[in-house]
Image (cartoon, coloured by chain):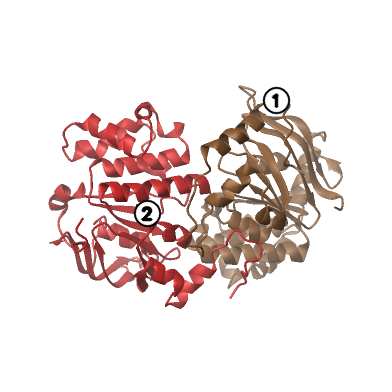
Amino acid sequence: MSIDCPVYQVQNLHLSLADMTQKSFFGSAPQINILKDISFDIMKGEVLGIVGGSGSGKSTLGRTMIRLLEPSQGRIFFEGQDITHLPEENLRPLRHRFQMIFQDPMSSLNPRRKVGRIIEGPLKLHGFDRISERMAEALDLVGLPRSFQGRYPHELSGGQRQRVGIARAIATRPDFILADEIVSGLDVSSQAQVLNLLADLVRELGLTLAFISHDLAVIRRLCSRVLVLKHGQIVELSTTERLFEAPSSDYTRELLNAIPLPDPDQIWATN
Amino acid sequence: MMKPFLSIKNLTVSLKSSKEPLLRSVSLDLAAGNVLGLVGESGAGKSMIGKAILGILPQAVEITAGEIWLNDQELLRKPAKERRKFIGASTALIPQDPLTALNPSRRIGPQITERLVDILDWKKDAALARALELLNEVQIPDPERVMHSYPHEISGGMRQRILIASAFAANPKLIIADEPTTALDVTVQKQILHLIADLQARHQTSLLFVTHDLGVVSKVCQHLSVLYAGKVIEASEIRDFFKNPKHPYSRALLAATPKYNDPASSLTPVPEEVIAEVEAEIFAPRTECSHVN
């Protein structure tokens, strides 16, 4: 696997949206800057963690990268191609190459569709051949029995539902996956299972992954590099090892100190 | 141990339709002014215990056996009306999701005061004054403004503070906190947990703390009970538990909890053998559960 080629290049990215709460009856609403001057690369085969508190802009950054949102300034390159302002019809042929796994599987899986149809959805949309075969392979890859294709999402546990979300994302064999807080709704045992599965898939399929989370403990297990966001700005971008050994920003230290370890003797005072 | 304030004895809750038990002869004790953690995976029945105490079990389930003692009074044998009045006056709930617990179309103020006025017969001014005092106590800046705000106008952390204020409003003797910080990020979670612990200590409230996060339990609780499939499989003092978890399932749960400060810690899901072992113990009749003390 070549590791030199960046899958994503993000350069001086800005995103502002209209603040509708401040809009007067006449005239336009003021803009609020959500992402401010963000630049980074993601290399092939890398797992990049994106961390920050709620409202820091992590999900907005992720959604801008896969062009669910259009940036106001700056540029985004996907495998060398400028996708910053690409119109939807030109994005469509690229979309199967960057997929997303959502936080809440209950609201991102259609409750009226069986698992098989859910996973086949993107395959049909992008005009793949051998659809049911690919769907069955995706189920195999996430470790769900093939018989699950006949079940509805409500018949599955939280961890199983999240596996369906993963299966749908990998069915089109993407180069890049954005995983947005995908284990925060799960209890520790299912969380461990899903994370291990994701780590295996990254290795087996040569995936590149951006993993959004507010939980640094989870990041440590999965990611090779970590980007820390605060108020829409990058406050730290370093290798996972360095981030945990010697965090350079106060905000990172604050995030680390806030994690309750399973240890009653940990000093956990408010700062 | 001093006389428990809350004592649950052999509580069994089952589905009305299939008679399938959801809580299997659960017993636990909570001393006055103490914090007891209820830990388990999703579906273990943690929240069900809280709901049984508060008398808000879903329609589809019923209590088939057991006793719930609160302050030397048995709840389940009381007439329904009297029971509701007693529970309403002495307990409160801090729910998991503040956005669904607050009415989105009403201002914050009346949502805190109405329980005091309508149910506990407080005077309106007194309730209003108490609400302001509480919002100060939970460190909400500019409480007057917040009282006039709608839930969507304030942040998730603030909403959770409001619900905490609301829970402590009528000086309850027992508070049930049902995963109160799962929806929050770590820094806000830390503030909220400190706040709950402070208020609990100051008012000497007994607290039943439901969570799946062993990290959180180690910070707030003095005792914990581990549940699996509606059964208490281990009940321990907090330091004993983290030093020496007795049940293999507890050990596996602890191993599955991520520890950011330990690069060697691997995330190990609870192994199949352990699940098989604990299930054999629960579902095989007449096997004494040896790990409960």
Alpha carbons under labels 2 and 1: distance apart: 44 Å
Height in image: A248 above or below B2?
A: below
Viewport quadrant of the C terminus of chain B: top right
The answer to whether tags 2 and 1 share a subunit is: no
Q: Secondary structure at mark 2?
A: strand
Identify the image quadrant of residue A209: bottom left
Front residue of A108 and A195 = A195
Q: Amino acid at mark 2?
A: Asp
**In the visual, does B81 lie left or right of A79?**
right
Q: Percent from the top left, x then y, of residue B82?
A: 81, 39
Front residue of A265 and A40 = A265
- Provide the letter of the chain coloured red: A
Q: Residue at x 65, y 39 (%)?
A: B48
Badge 1 crowding class, 10 Å Cα cut-off, few under 14, some 14 to 19, many 20 or more, is few
Front residue of A262 and B59 = A262
Tag 2, which chain?
Answer: A
Height in image: A9 above or below B113?
A: below
Q: Percent from the top left, x then y, of residue B2?
A: 87, 53
Q: Which mark is residue A180?
A: 2
The answer to whether any part of residue B110 appears in the image is no
Q: Percent from the top left, x then y, of residue A255?
A: 49, 68
- The residue that disc 1 covers is B285
Q: Residue furthest top?
A: B18
Q: Secondary structure at mark 1?
A: loop
**In the visual, does A258 lie left or right of A12?**
right
Front residue of B249 and A122 = B249
Q: Which mark is residue B78?
A: none
Identify the image quadrant of residue A21: bottom left
Q: Amino acid at mark 1?
A: Pro
Q: Residue at x 23, y 42 (%)?
A: A172
**Chain B tint as drawn:** brown
